[in-house]
Amino acid sequence: MSILERIKEKAKQSRKRIVFPEGDEPRTLQAAVILSSEGIADPILLGNEATIREAALAADADITNIEVIDPENSPSAEAYTAKLYELRKAKGMTIENAASLVKDPMYYGIMMVKTGDADGLVSGAAHTTGDMLRPALQIIKTQPGIGIVSSSMLVEVPNQNIGDHGLLVYADCVVVPCPTASELAQIAVSAAQTAKKLCDIEEPRVALLSFSTKGSAQHELVTKVREATQIAHKLSPSLLLDGEMQFDAALIPEIGASKAKGSPVAGCANVLVFPDLQAGNIGYKITQRLGGAIAFAVLQGLDKPCNDLSRGCSVEDIVATAAITAVQAQ
Ligand code: ACO
């Protein structure tokens, strides 16, 4: 069974309410119908009701049994306004700003998740990553004990001998442009947690990647990865984690054995931590486009699950991201 099939099965076991701020977006409407009819999640569509029903008709999506909420005319708007004002007044938010923001489906959706009226949020078919991430970071905030929100990419490669039977977790490919050593350490620990929770990888083996393996090169960028490795060991002493190491030393047993002898991770890593966002984002796209891999992004470290789509996403991508979000909410 593929990782996606497993995640969908898990989602069905305890159905969660997933809110979509882009309620009139045609692919989102089609995905909502699949999620509802296959019992993967209970979708909630946000936006102007007449516009959504018209868009559904045009997209050939029967949304008769799907909940639609118009943030402009919602009985919950007043309570969300008061809550948003309370949460952000120290940052200069006025009650008027808050009232205006909750009419925006993105903020309304985030407030639904914050207050527990929805279990998770999926958006990004029509918005940039930053459009959703900023309000999520400001309002949902991080899980207790986790300092930073980052992402993992669940990557399934054709070669079953790599990672965990062809499954790898890459981090961070979406959120933190230039992590410090301590942020990189936190990303490594969060990625290991994601590997356990979403991929059923019982023993995450985490490699912190670099252009150097165990001192083969000296540079401040390498020093940062080495420091991150030490900090991550302190954050999670029982985790199998090692660095700094090159991509091939992390994945290929013979190279790992020769370049990082005795490492518990080299040659058999299943969680790869990239040194910054440029490396991570480029790395996953190379794996996807040249390596024939399938990849799904997931945000980690948020107190409640919210996930982002690419604007080029397919209906199936939206279904997959909603299923992942539902499992995170379980
Ligand atoms: N974790 C936790 N909190 C954070 C983080 C983080 N990683 N980043 C910012 N914050 C908090 C800030 O502390 C601040 O909180 P406050 O207002 O309560 O004080 C709030 O979020 C907003 O911070 P800003 O400084 O306004 O936000 P910033 O400009 O740093 O933007 C963002 C954050 C949107 C995540 C930015 O780092 C970003 O654009 N990242 C890259 C996104 C991207 O384009 N990814 C690649 C494409 S996606 C793909 O290819 C799949």
Image: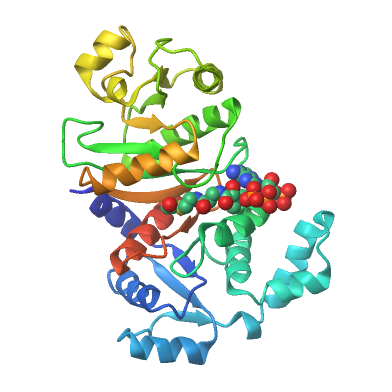
Provide residue 175's location: percent of width, then percent of height.
52, 46
Q: x, y (%) of residue 290?
A: 23, 45
Residue drawn at 20 percent across, 47 percent down: 292
33 horizontally vs 142: left or right: left
Question: Residue 309, relative to residue 82: is it above or below?
Answer: above
Depth check: give the residue in front, 11 or 229. 229
Task: Identify whether 308 is placed above or below 277.
Answer: below
Q: Residue at x 55, y 53 (%)?
A: 304
| Quadrant assignment, res 309 | bottom left
249 in relation to 326, above or below: above
Q: How is the image coloured?
A: rainbow
| Res. 205 image quadrant | top left
| x, y percent for residue 4 | 27, 52
Left or right of 5 in this view: 275: right
- Is residue 198 at least partly visible in the picture? no
On screen, residue 248 above or below 297: above
Residue 105 versus residue 14: which sits nearer the camera? 105
Going 30% across and 43% down the picture, which residue do you hit? Answer: 286
Total numbered labels: 0
Residue 166 position by quadrant:
top left
Counting from the top left corner in percent of width and height, residue 305 is at 51, 54
Instruction: Out of 217 and 120, give the one closest to the viewer.
Output: 217
Is there any visible trace of residue 122 in the rendered image? Answer: yes
